[in-house]
Image (cartoon, rainbow, N blue to C red):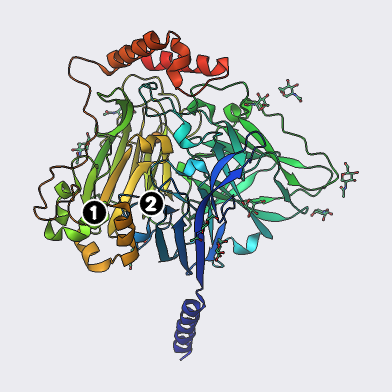
Amino acid sequence: MAGRILQFLSGLTLLLTICQAAVIEKYFNMTWVMANPDGMQERKVIGVNNTWPLPVLEVNKGDRLIVHVYNGLGDKSTSIHWHGLFQNSTNEMDGPSMQTQCPIVPGASFTYDFTVDQSGTYWYHCHTDLCYPDGYRQMLLVHDDDAWFTNQYKEEFAVTVSDWYHNLVEDITFISLSNPTGAEPIPSNFLFNDSIANTKLSVEPNTTYLLRIVNTGAFVAQYFYIEDHDFTIVEVDGVFTEPQQASLIYVAVAQRYSILFTTKASTSRNYGLVTIADQVLLDGIPDTLSLNQTNWLQYNSSAAFDPVNVTLNVVDENPAFDDYSLVPYDKEPLFANPSKVINLTVSMGILENGKPYAFFNDQTYTKPKVPSLYTALTSGEEATNEAVYGDYTNAFVLDHLDVVEVVLTNNDGGSHPFHYHGHNFQVVSRFPSYGEDFYSLANNVNPQAYDPNNHTAFPKYPMRRDVAVLPPMGNLVIRFVANNPGVWAFHCHIDWHMQQGLAATFIEAPLEMQKRLSVPDDHFAACKAAGMPYAGNAAANTKDILDLSGQNKPARPVPAGFTARGIVALVFSCVAAFAGLAAITWYGMAPLSSSEQVSMVASHLRTSDE
Ligand SMILES: *[C@@H]1O[C@H](CO)[C@@H](O)[C@H](O)[C@H]1NC(C)=O
Ligand SMILES: *[C@@H]1O[C@H](CO)[C@@H](O)[C@H](O)[C@H]1NC(C)=O
Ligand SMILES: *[C@@H]1O[C@H](CO)[C@@H](O)[C@H](O)[C@H]1NC(C)=O
Ligand SMILES: *[C@@H]1O[C@H](CO)[C@@H](O)[C@H](O)[C@H]1NC(C)=O
Ligand SMILES: *[C@@H]1O[C@H](CO)[C@@H](O)[C@H](O)[C@H]1NC(C)=O
Ligand SMILES: *[C@@H]1O[C@H](CO)[C@@H](O)[C@H](O)[C@H]1NC(C)=O
Ligand SMILES: *[C@@H]1O[C@H](CO)[C@@H](O)[C@H](O)[C@H]1NC(C)=O
Ligand SMILES: *[C@@H]1O[C@H](CO)[C@@H](O)[C@H](O)[C@H]1NC(C)=O
Ligand SMILES: *[C@@H]1O[C@H](CO)[C@@H](O)[C@H](O)[C@H]1NC(C)=O
Ligand SMILES: *[C@@H]1O[C@H](CO)[C@@H](O)[C@H](O)[C@H]1NC(C)=O
Ligand SMILES: [Cu+2]
């Protein structure tokens, strides 16, 4: 009897929880506004309703979020990705243009409408070409009273860290003849919560707080520590973890951490919240760019707020905590015996047009004419045939409930933070690991490939997250279960690299998608407004679904007999001859002011030519 009453009560609680779920409805008019977050240069940024930073979205687990987007920009297309949210049964709300929707062109509208059935720290950002570096990104926090650490802190804080450019993305020379080495644009600055040396977390002594940290940058990872305070990691990328002590973390772009920290007994002074940009990612560091920033834990408003004297030793003597050793709180066991293995080798290089691109297995991602989701929904039985998604979209079809293993091998001397939409994944192997050896292979000639028959033991309960970093010239092995029918982007989260084509499309259970998903009419209206087809294969052919003629193609590969390096040299000497000032024209056509930029380009040239 008691058992039955309990059962009844828990049923009632469930019912109440469902009934309590709120509907949070927002109207976003995307507009250009002026902002000057670092106090060094006012610039145009993308705001909502003429306001920037964008609104922080806060919901409770189970809530329904509806965001009506109007593109009031006039000159730029847009879309919103809800980073880390699974969009289980609502794939059409995921946001990446040409994968799950058409771009929202100026003057068009689009409604995102979905239920948030996860908890933790997320963010939202534009996912149409290069657009989030122009300020179009913000936190999305999902509160959950059932989180295991809910009762362990008094108050919570949430902050973003990010790189910042003083120029609009259109005004930054990147995929260009004048940048054949693909040198990523050096940020103008680094922001802490969209500001500089301006954030003070007001704390009481002897008290525990929760701090959420989101890297909303386009490129650069950052180290983070609190002066003289250790802390406890309790969440990564929306996955609650077993408590893990740490003193320094490495937060790649798009990654999130929640930490608990306990304040000291004394209020005699304030302590620094220190961020240090990972300089290894930068091809050069202009004198004007400070890699480190201090913000503060404010114990005492009358005491000094001194910048922390950061030395590089902080990072060298204290390798950042290796996220590979985290254990998810739910202790989900290793996904064993993959039924599908996808090998992806990452490389960077140029195509025949002399411009720099990025490749998975020598193929740069090129957008299809029809968003891949709409192809899956309109191709009938042929939706399971990879061919219909086109030859240049890096499309992989997964069976429903496949245990998928993705083996990433890095044939590039830079690290890449990989993100998968619609899931989090287990990180089952990584070489070299975070910490001292992370960059040890960067100058290798050949990558260290993963050997499925000879690797360190897989963790019993592997760390799960939705962004993990592939080390330079190393490898990374992730696993997930294809339990979310939909079209999901898999890509490097360095926005510059994604624009260069470092992306793939995983098509999960297309026949299940046809049964479960439905696309609202306003999504098709957005295609009409954009003049884009929304049915048929990647070439928009609806009659002969296997005829891909007319599909979008990338530039051709460098012809046989020319090495990529030869082309680089050729282009370089053409540019040099043209301008007579090789070093200055090299990096870009944008005006260059400092000699640092010149020497940084020269050093990039050296490393890539060796
Ligand atoms: C934007 O402005 C519209 C119209 O005034 C308003 O209804 C809406 O709530 C505003 N949205 C935000 C996020 O402030
Ligand atoms: C969006 O904002 C712009 C600029 O303030 C305004 O002209 C336009 O009417 C707004 N559109 C909507 C649909 O709110
Ligand atoms: C960070 O900025 C957002 C708004 O941009 C604000 O809501 C939030 O309170 C700030 N965090 C802290 C700790 O000040
Ligand atoms: C903090 O805790 C310590 C020891 O528990 C106690 O001695 C001290 O008075 C507390 N300080 C404050 C400001 O509450
Ligand atoms: C706060 O700092 C001031 C200046 O250093 C100091 O005089 C004061 O005693 C401190 N207050 C407390 C409560 O610790
Ligand atoms: C910063 O630390 C370095 C190395 O420990 C030291 O040489 C230097 O004097 C310090 N600078 C300041 C302003 O404290
Ligand atoms: C931190 O920034 C200061 C000021 O720009 C600079 O002097 C120092 O070298 C930087 N430290 C590191 C580790 O980058
Ligand atoms: C992936 O690579 C491994 C190791 O080179 C190889 O044995 C396997 O056949 C490859 N699998 C696929 C599906 O390409
Ligand atoms: C397995 O890998 C280790 C470490 O890379 C290497 O030393 C060893 O020779 C390898 N064993 C075999 C049988 O390949
Ligand atoms: C999606 O929901 C189904 C149940 O409706 C569940 O089995 C599956 O695990 C979910 N997938 C994800 C990624 O949460
Ligand atoms: Cu990358």
Q: Based on the displayed image, in which of its 4 quarters is residue 414 positioned?
A: top left
Q: Secondary structure at mark 2?
A: loop
**Mark 1 neighbour density, 10 Å: few (under 14) some (14–19) many (20 or more):** some
Q: Position of residue 567 (x, y in %)?
A: 28, 16
Q: Position of residue 249 (x, y in %)?
A: 56, 40
Q: Left or right? Give the position of 398 relative to 530.
A: left
Residue at image point 41% right, 66% down: 114
Q: Is residue 141 in sight in this rendering?
A: yes
Q: Left or right? Give the position of 232 relative to 430.
A: right
Residue at image point 20% right, 57% down: 535
Quadrant position of the N terminus in the picture: bottom left
Residue 533 — which label?
Answer: 1
Residue at image point 36% right, 40% down: 429
Residue at image point 21% right, 55% down: 375
Above or below — where is 289 with respect to 466?
above
Q: Earlier in the sequence, mark 2 or mark 1?
A: 2
Extreme residue in the bottom direction: 1
Q: CA distance from mark 2 to mark 1?
A: 14 Å
Q: Is mark 1 within 8 Å of ligand 2?
A: no
Q: Position of residue 289 (x, y in %)?
A: 61, 26
Q: Is residue 482 in sight in this rendering?
A: no
The amino acid type found where label 1 is placed reads Pro
Q: Secondary structure at mark 1?
A: loop
The amino acid type found where label 2 is placed reads Val
Quadrant position of the C terminus in the picture: top left
Residue sitting nearer the eye, 413 or 129: 129
Above or below — where is 186 with respect to 209?
above
Residue 105 — which label?
Answer: 2
